[in-house]
Image (spheres, rainbow, N blue to C red):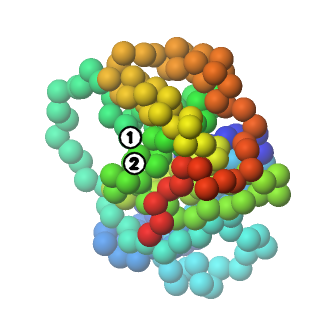
Amino acid sequence: MSQEWNIRSRGHVCTICQKPLVDKTPVVSALKETADGYERFDCHPECWKVQERDWTPFSQWDGVYFAPVREVKKEALKKEDAGELLRQLVTLDDPAMKNVVYVLAVMLERSKILVERDAKELEDGTIRRVYEDRKQGDTFVILDPRLRLENLSEVQQQVVALLSGTKTLGEVSGEEEAAGIAEEAAEPTANEVQPETT
C-alpha cells in the first residue's frame, strides 16, 4: 500500500446489522486492510461476535460510542488548531510531510485528544500506528518515521510555524525534502521519538 497514512470516520450505524449505534454504549471498531487503504467497521459487540469473517483485522479495539453533538459555530479562527492541521495533512497525503504528521499525532496524543489503539510492524519494517480521536471517533493510521531526537527540534519548529501561520504547507514540505529529514527510516535506537504508552 502506497499511502503513508489514512483517516477513517467513525460510523453511526452498525456495519453488520445496519441498526443505529446508541449513545454511550459499547462498540467494537476494526480496520480491514484493502488495496485502496483501510475499511473501518463499527459494530454492536454481539454482532461482531457472531459475524463470520474470512479476513483478519489490521487493528481491532473495544470502545464506547458517543453520538455526535452539534456545536454552536464560533467565529472562524484565522489559525488552524493542531487537529485541523493533522486532518488537512492526512488529506494531502504528501510523503515529505510524514515527520510533521507523526509529531502532530504524538502531540495530540499527549494532549489527550488522540488515543493510540494499535501499532503494527509490517513486513517491510515500517510501523503504522492507529490513533482514534477521543471526541469525534475518527481513526488515523499514521506512519511512524522513527524520527531521531536530533531531528525533533526542527520538526517541532515546523509544526509551530504551521500552527502560527508563519509558514505554508508548501514551504515546510520543501524544507523537509531539502533537509533530508524525510529519508529512509533508520534502525530503531534509544534516541527515537516514541508516543506515550498507556
User: Residue at position x 49%, y 41% from top?
Assistant: 103
Secondary structure category for the residue under label 2: helix
Give the crowd class for mark 2: few <14, some 14-19, many >=20 residues within 10 Å.
some
Residue 88 seen anywhere in this rendered image of the structure: no
> Does 125 sit left or right of 97 as displayed?
right
The answer to which of 61 and 47 lies nearer the viewer is 61
- Point out the tag, 2 or 1, that comes first from the N-terminus: 1
In the image, what residue type sits under mark 2? Leu
Query: Where's the C terminus, which quadrant?
Result: bottom left
Q: Which residue is mark 1?
A: 83
Q: State the quadrant of the N terminus.
A: top right
Position of residue 140 relative to residue 176, above or below, is below
Residue at horizontal 38%, vertical 71%?
64
Residue that mark 2 sits on: 108
Q: Residue at x 67, y 41 (%)?
A: 4
Question: Quick check: 11 left or right of 180?
Answer: left
* Residue 105: image location, x then y, percent: 47, 46
**Residue extending farthest right:** 123
Alpha carbon distance from label 2 to label 1: 7 Å
Using the image as rendered, state which of residue 160 and residue 15 is in the foreground. Answer: 160
Residue type pointed to by label 1: Gly
- Callout 2–callout 1 Cβ contact below 8 Å: yes
